[in-house]
Image: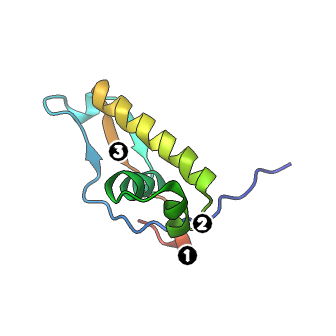
């Protein structure tokens, strides 16, 4: 049985850079954590804009439960990067309508 396809997500948050890392450590020597556009979008909508998970889901075109799962992953990755001196790499993936961001 093949896995279920990934539902397209609306990601309006644009990247301002390619990565965030601690200073003083060369990028080639640091562990990297990939942060995907849907994770960044859920962080922005829920934690910066103050939307509920239900409202964020409506904005992104996905269910509240999916937002909850994505948000938990994004928070875990961000906390790990901040507390363990790892780099957050903003990964470009396909969002809605085949647009690569």
Q: Residue at x 29, y 31 (%)?
A: 82
**Quick one: label 2 or label 3, which is nearer the N terminus?**
2
Q: Residues within 10 Å of mark 1 (few under 14, many from 20)?
A: few
Q: CA distance from mark 2 to mark 3?
A: 21 Å
Q: Residue at x 45, y 66 (%)?
A: 11
Report if the CB atoms under discs 3 and 1 are less than 8 Å apart: no
Q: How many marks?
A: 3
Residue 30 screen position, x and y as percent: 29, 29
**Quick one: label 1 or label 2, which is nearer the N terminus?**
2
Q: Up-down: is 8 above or below 80?
A: below
Extreme-top residue of the structure: 84
Report if the CB atoms under discs 2 and 3 are less than 8 Å apart: no
**Quick one: label 3 or label 1, which is nearer the N terminus?**
3
Residue 81 screen position, x and y as percent: 33, 32
Report if the CB atoms under discs 1 and 2 are less than 8 Å apart: yes
Q: CA distance from mark 3 to mark 1?
A: 23 Å
The quadrant where residue 34 appears: top left
Relative to residue 94, is residue 86 drawn left or right? left
Q: Nearer the viewer, residue 24 or 14?
A: 14
Q: Which residue is mark 2?
A: 8
Q: Which mark is residue 97?
A: 1
Helix, strand or loop at mark 2 = loop
Helix, strand or loop at mark 1 = helix
Observer-side mark, 2 or 3, equals 2
Extreme-right residue of the structure: 1
Q: Which residue is mark 3?
A: 89
């Amino acid at each position: 049985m093949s896995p279920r396809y990934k539902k397209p997500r609306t990601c309006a948050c644009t990247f301002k850079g390619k990565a965030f890392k601690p200073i003083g450590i060369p990028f080639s020597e640091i562990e990297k954590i990939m942060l995907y556009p849907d994770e960044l979008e859920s962080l922005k909508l829920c934690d910066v804009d103050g939307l509920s998970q239900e409202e964020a889901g409506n904005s992104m075109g996905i269910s509240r439960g999916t937002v909850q799962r994505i948000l938990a992953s994004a928070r875990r990755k961000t906390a790990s990067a901040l507390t363990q001196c790892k780099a957050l790499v903003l990964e470009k993936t396909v969002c809605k309508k085949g647009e690569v961001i």
